[in-house]
Amino acid sequence: MDGQNSDKKELLLITGSPRKNGVTAMLAEIFLEEAKRLDKDINVTILDTYTLALNPCTHCGYCKKTPACVHKDFLPVDAALQKADILVIASPVYVLGFPAPLKALLDRSQQYFEAKFSLGITSIKKHKKAILLSAYGSKDNRGILFMEKQLKMIFNVFNAELNAIITARNTDSGNVDFDALREEIKTALAGILLI
Ligand SMILES: Cc1cc2nc3c(=O)[nH]c(=O)nc-3n(C[C@H](O)[C@H](O)[C@H](O)COP(=O)(O)O)c2cc1C
């Protein structure tokens, strides 16, 4: 056991936008700034799903018999999920859902469902608090509702509870109130870091 770091909070940020200067990236940046302001020792791991470019699940059946995925590209995601105390998913809405590289990551959690329901194994032992940061271009919030449902399902096997959803809406108008969003983020963070 790493005695030196054992009391540090581990924050895992999974990003789902290809745009480095987009609204989602800005929300994630504000989130990290405010998290570090509240807890200067917090340890941050960032997984960019566009860089990871995970293979999609092929429903090969391997994880029904062995508690792992046959494709080894998921191993860094599993390692990061194992140690996280706080999980942040930062994603734009694409066609009322998650962009393909992030959806691939979520689909690959099938290995955890099979571990649980076919093999009776709990894969992710550490409980986490989770937050969804999202941006959508229109005033139509259906994407967020669908994404919330998907995350709640997957969080059963990620051992995570969804504590807050913070969204920038109507982003394609160019009018995004980042100050108001920062306040929302601060409130959400106080709820998970100060208790
Ligand atoms: C492929 C694609 C699909 C999109 N689908 C939706 C959608 O279903 N609903 C919506 O409100 N906006 C949609 N948008 C707009 C984005 O959600 C919006 O521009 C968002 O700010 C992009 O995030 P980013 O600024 O972090 O890149 C879509 C954009 C793209 C490129």
Image (tube, rainbow, N blue to C red):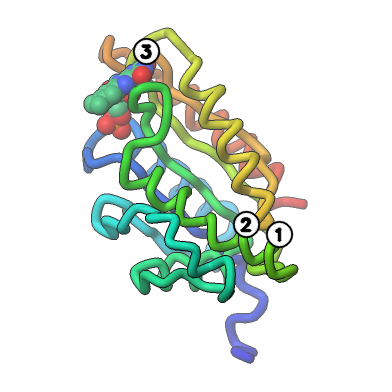
Distance between the alpha carbons at the discs numbered 1 and 3: 40 Å
Q: Nearer the viewer, mark 1 or mark 3?
A: 1
Residue that mark 2 sits on: 113
Image height check: is 101 above or below 72? Answer: above
Image height check: is 127 above or below 151? Answer: below
Q: Amino acid at mark 1?
A: Phe
Q: Amino acid at mark 3?
A: Asn
Q: Is residue 107 left or right of residue 162?
A: left
Where does the image place residue 164, in percent across and percent down from the top left?
63, 35
Q: Amino acid at mark 2?
A: Phe
Q: Residues within 10 Å of mark 3 (few under 14, many from 20)?
A: some
Distance between the alpha carbons at the discs numbered 1 and 2: 6 Å
Does the beta carbon at disc 2 come under 8 Å from ligand 1? no
Residue that mark 3 sits on: 170
Where does the image place residue 9, in percent across and percent down from the top left?
61, 66
**Callout 2 secondary element:** helix
**Callout 1 secondary element:** helix
Where does the image place residue 31, in percent across and percent down from the top left?
47, 44
Q: Which numbered disc flags the more N-terminal residue, 2 or 3?
A: 2
Residue at the spot 40% in from the left edge and 19% down from the top edge:
177
Residues at circles 1 and 2 in contact by the CB criterion of under 8 Å: yes
Does the beta carbon at disc 3 come under 8 Å from ligand 1? yes
Where does the image place residue 155, in percent across and percent down from the top left?
63, 48
Front position in the image: 165 or 101? 101
The image quarter containing residue 66 is: bottom right
Front position in the image: 177 or 64? 64
Image height check: is 102 above or below 142? Answer: below
Residue that mark 1 sits on: 117
